[in-house]
Amino acid sequence: MNIERDQISEDILKSIVFGLTGKNASGKGTVAEILKKKNFTYHSLSDSLRDELKSLKKEETRENLIDIGNELREKGGPGVLADKLMPKLNSENNHIVDSIRNPLEVISLRKETLLRRFFLISVDANSKLRYDRLCSRGRIGDTDSWEKFVEQEKKEENNDDPNKQQLSRTMEMADYSIDNSGTLEELEAQVNRIISSL
């Protein structure tokens, strides 16, 4: 069976949900694009945060996204963002859930997707490389300061409050880890290896 292209057996990819976690500008979006070409339906936990900021007429900055996410978790519990998304995973399609940043989101997705196969993929790369990528992509809310980038990373990685981002602990829960420090071709090969292992 050839899995190097987009011709992947529907038997292999029946009812799969891939969760994506990883540090800022690690390449989660690129992994999602690779999976979308294989007919995965894309969702992001950050979309509900962006919607919330719009309704509050707040600017879409990384700080505001983090703050509103923490606020929603405090009100609805640490897994609230995953819980809000769950109805969208009811179709028989294969799905991607991007921007998972709290261990309880993983637990919620694993518990609620029992009729499907849920796999968490952690994506990472060298911090300087990620900063360079962040500067070149020009996304709303991204910083253009190395110092700010490092400060934001520390804020996202570890927190004793279960309602806040705990990226390091979330990444430790991954079923698969991808090092995206190389080329796009190397990244695609890693994604294809994960799919072929299922």
Image: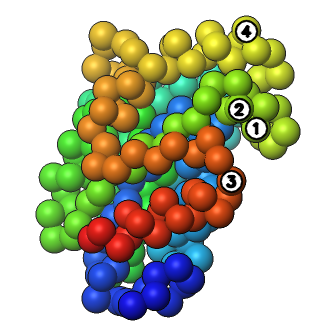
Q: Disc 2 designates what residue?
A: 129
Query: Depth check: 32 or 88 in front?
Result: 32
- Image quadrant occupied by the N terminus: bottom left
What is the three-letter code of the residue carrying label 3?
A: Thr
Number of disc labels: 4
| Residue 85 percent location from the top left of the image | 38, 55
Q: Is residue 2 toward the left or the right of residue 17 in the image?
A: right
Mark 3 and mark 1 in contact? Answer it, CB < 8 Å. Answer: no
Q: Quadrant of residue 61?
A: top right
| Residue 76 percent location from the top left of the image | 30, 33
Query: Depth check: 64 or 29 in front?
Result: 29
Please tell me which of labels 3 and 2 falls first in the chain: 2
Query: Depth check: 45 or 134 in front?
Result: 134
Residue appearing at x 39%, y 50% in the figure: 121
Q: Measure the C-alpha gap from mark 2 to mark 1.
A: 6 Å
Q: Measure the C-alpha gap from mark 4 to mark 3.
A: 26 Å
Residue appearing at x 41%, y 27% in the figure: 167
- Image quadrant occupied by the C terminus: bottom left
Instruction: Say few, some or many: other residues with alpha carbon within 10 Å of mark 3 (under 14 / 14 to 19 / 20 or more).
Output: few
Residue appearing at x 83%, y 22% in the figure: 144
Q: Disc 4 designates what residue?
A: 147
What is the three-letter code of the residue carrying label 1?
A: Arg
| Residue 149 percent location from the top left of the image | 69, 18
Please tell me which of labels 3 and 1 falls first in the chain: 1
Q: Disc 3 designates what residue?
A: 183
Residue appearing at x 37%, y 35% in the figure: 171
What is the three-letter code of the residue carrying label 4?
A: Glu
Please tell me which of labels 2 and 4 falls first in the chain: 2
Please tell me which of labels 4 and 1 falls first in the chain: 1
Q: Measure the C-alpha gap from mark 4 to mark 1.
A: 15 Å
